[in-house]
Image: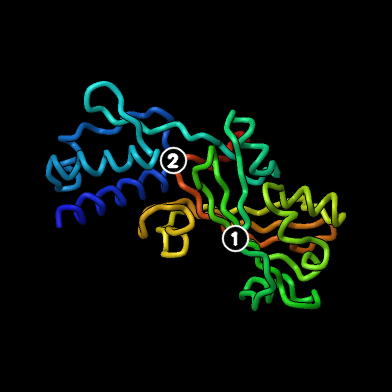
Amino acid sequence: MGNFKYQRLARQIAQELVGSVWRDQAELPSELRLQQRYGASRTTVRRALAQLVAQGLLEKGQGRVSRVASPIVVKQLSELADFHTLVQASGKTPQTRVLAFELCAGSLQTDVYFEAVQGAPVLLRRRRLVDRKPVVYQRVYLPHWVWVGLHRRDLENASLYRLLSQRLDSPVVSVTDVVSACQADAETASALHVNQGDVLIQADRLGWGADGGVIEISRAFVQPGHFRFSATSPLVSG
């Protein structure tokens, strides 16, 4: 029961951290204040904070102060920079492992967006690593014509967008992103080596081609201690 309490508290705090805007290195309230806020014992609070430190969401400051950790990569929403480019820019080593590349039955979204495309949609499942640590698990649906032009081996440690542009002359020219918090299901937990129920960032994306059609339907599950999605907009007066 004790383990369940601190894991539940860790997930509750993680949900608040992922679902809100936090300044890097922002100090969390004291352990006493956290005990009062969540109605938890000192031991439960300390174990929950330790778990979040291990997950990369928090880091320890002086004494028993917990701080919001700075992520490895900050990704601007709707930008087209690929995973490998972003991670390399942060001084880390990226890797991509293809778990599946196969024809599939599709989904409601593929029925809508790929309706005019002949043939079954393609499902790409891949795991993205930073310095050999899995941080992103992604499921991508693609139109049938990708199956004819690409092979699984092409996608190992490669940018899908670059391949679509260079090999198939079908670049993604704009994207629509929706980001939310979620909990890891059994499949995602296994892929990312986390516990089922751990809080993750869920990033859904539609990739649009030059002709106005959808080329990519993607859902990525991201460990929040490593990535942050951000968008900054200027204030327009008047």
Render colour scheme: rainbow
Disc number for residue 225: 2
Tell me which amino acid carries mark 1: Leu
Residue 229 lies in what quarter of the image?
top right
Extreme right residue here? 169
Name which of mark 2 and mark 1 comes first in the sequence.
1
Q: Position of residue 45 (x, y in %)?
A: 19, 42
**Residue marked by disc 1:** 99
Question: Which quadrant of the figure contains the C terminus?
Answer: top right
Q: Few, some or many C-alpha atoms within 10 Å of disc 1 (few <14, some 14-19, many ≥20)?
A: some
> Where is the N terminus found, in terms of image quarters?
bottom left
Judge whether 180 appears above or below 32 on screen.
below
Other residues around mark 2 within 10 Å, as few (<14) / some (14–19) / many (≥20): many
What amino acid does circle 2 point to? Gly
Residue at the image point whose x is 48% and y is 40% from the top: 226
Q: Residue at x 25, y 33 (%)?
A: 29
Question: What residue do we see at 36% from left, 29% from top?
Answer: 26
Element under disc 1: strand
198 relative position to 137: left or right:
left
- Taking the view exactly as shown, the residue that stands out farthest to the left is 41
For the residues labelled 2 and 1, the Cα–Cα distance comes to 23 Å
